[in-house]
Image (tube, grey):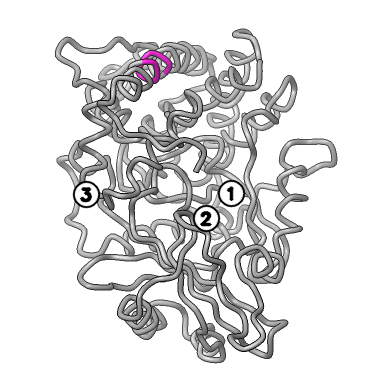
Amino acid sequence: MLRDKVGRDAHANWAPKKGRNDPVATILVSSSDRLKTLVPIKMGRMAASPFAFFRGAAPLMAADLSKLPVTGLHVQICGDAHVRNLGAYAAPEGHLVFDINDFDETIPGPWEWDLKRLATSIVLAGREAGENKNGCRDSVEEMVLNYRTSMNRFASMSVCELAKVEIRRGAKGTPVHAVLQKASRVTPVDTLNKLAVLGRRTGHRFHDRPPVLRHVDTRTRREVIKSLLAYRKTISVSHQWVLQAYEPVDVAFKIVGTGSVGTRDYVVLLFGNGVEDPLILQVKEEVPSCYAPHLSRRTPVKHEGRRVAEAQKKIQTVTDPLLGYTTIDGRHFLVRQLADHKASINPPDLKGTALHEYAVVCGELLAKGHARTGDAAATAGYCGNSFRLDTALAKFAKLYADQTESDYEQFKKAITKGRVRAVLGK
């Protein structure tokens, strides 16, 4: 049995192995293939807090997780499961959906890795919000409890039933409802007004707000727009004609997130039926998952953008119909709508009961994604009906959150000493 191989109590364990790589060196190496002028901005964003550091340090945790025992059950992991990578976005039919919404690090891998990263993020977010240690522990335990019970429920469903499951927990007053309300205000027109300006002669154009948003040179503009032809073939036929009706008018480079800073990320402004019908596409470079070097059992990836797009469609119940991929100058890109009714939680909002309520939803969402892409019955059987896994992962999350805070302090000292260049506040 799987529990004979790796007992549930074993998931509580964390202590840095002798010879563990210097965390600062690991972060620097993981950023070595990024645009060098932007790496200091990434480092500056990571320096904001332990949780911000955690967001940008997925390669560090991937290396640590690879040293721990695993059950051998694989699913399509999100790879970067933390509380800010679950949020709201618009379904094709117009209603708002709450689900996992970031898949840059996705790859077939051990289900435990997602659960441990999510659990640690709950503790770090709770600490940032001022939650005490008991509140953080209880929230992680509730998250794992709901993961277990949800997995057991999903294991009993037919494949068709599971394919339709949407998590709806947006009652008024809950943190999920707050995120849904925030997302409802992020319309294409609002995004246009935020990112673009209307000139008398030039029409709508993106703002120039370097380094966060800036226009690209003529060659890059031409190549990005040209890449949309290949991208169009990667979305459904039912939406290819929709995309054909939009005309690109401007292209800019945009810095997004924390972990993604330094990759090539373009935004394309298009219009359909007049200026009241804008569409903004994000053309986002995808590099190999940080988990790839630590997995021997994996199929070679031919296109990183396709890896992300296809995994997202497997994990999410409802997906952006314009999600696809393309190639520019031999580099792989994901293409999707930018901020179409998209929003996520901020750690300071996770105070008191909000942390607990949000953690419960996170557990159910992660279980849904894992059940859709792995052996739900086997995972449910391993998790069992007792609280042993809940307790174990709460212990792990506390220990690894402590480790993250220690690594964060080393990181800040490296900035002070000049070993790491960081631009703060960008």
Under tag 1, what secondary structure?
Answer: strand
Q: Nearer the viewer, residue 157 or 419?
A: 419
Q: Is residue 151 magenta?
A: no
Tell us which disc is closer to us: 2 or 3.
Answer: 3
- The structure residue drawn at horizontal position 53% and vertical position 22%, both measured from the top left corner, is 124
Under tag 3, what secondary structure?
Answer: loop
Which amino acid does the dot numbered 2 rest on?
Answer: Gln
Distance of mark 3 from mark 1, alpha carbons? 30 Å
Residue 177 is situated, as x and y percent measured from the top left of the image, at: 77, 44
- The structure residue drawn at horizontal position 56% and vertical position 21%, both measured from the top left corner, is 140
Find out whether the residues at labels 2 and 1 contact each other: C-beta distance under 8 Å. Answer: yes
Q: Nearer the viewer, residue 163 or 310?
A: 310
Q: Which mark is residue 316?
A: 2
Q: Which mark is residue 329?
A: none
Question: Seen in the image, is 337 located left or right of residue 351?
Answer: left
Image quadrant where residue 203 sits: bottom right
- The structure residue drawn at horizontal position 39% and vertical position 71%, both measured from the top left corner, is 216
Which amino acid does the dot numbered 3 rest on?
Answer: Asp
Q: Nearer the viewer, residue 291 or 383?
A: 291
Q: Nearer the viewer, residue 273 or 196?
A: 196
The residues colored magenta run: 405-409
Image quadrant where residue 173 sits: top right
Chief secondary structure of the magenta portion: helix
Q: Is residue 260 visible?
A: yes
Residue 291 is situated, as x and y percent measured from the top left of the image, at: 26, 40
Would you name the residue on which mark 1 appears? 99
Q: Residue furthest right?
A: 172
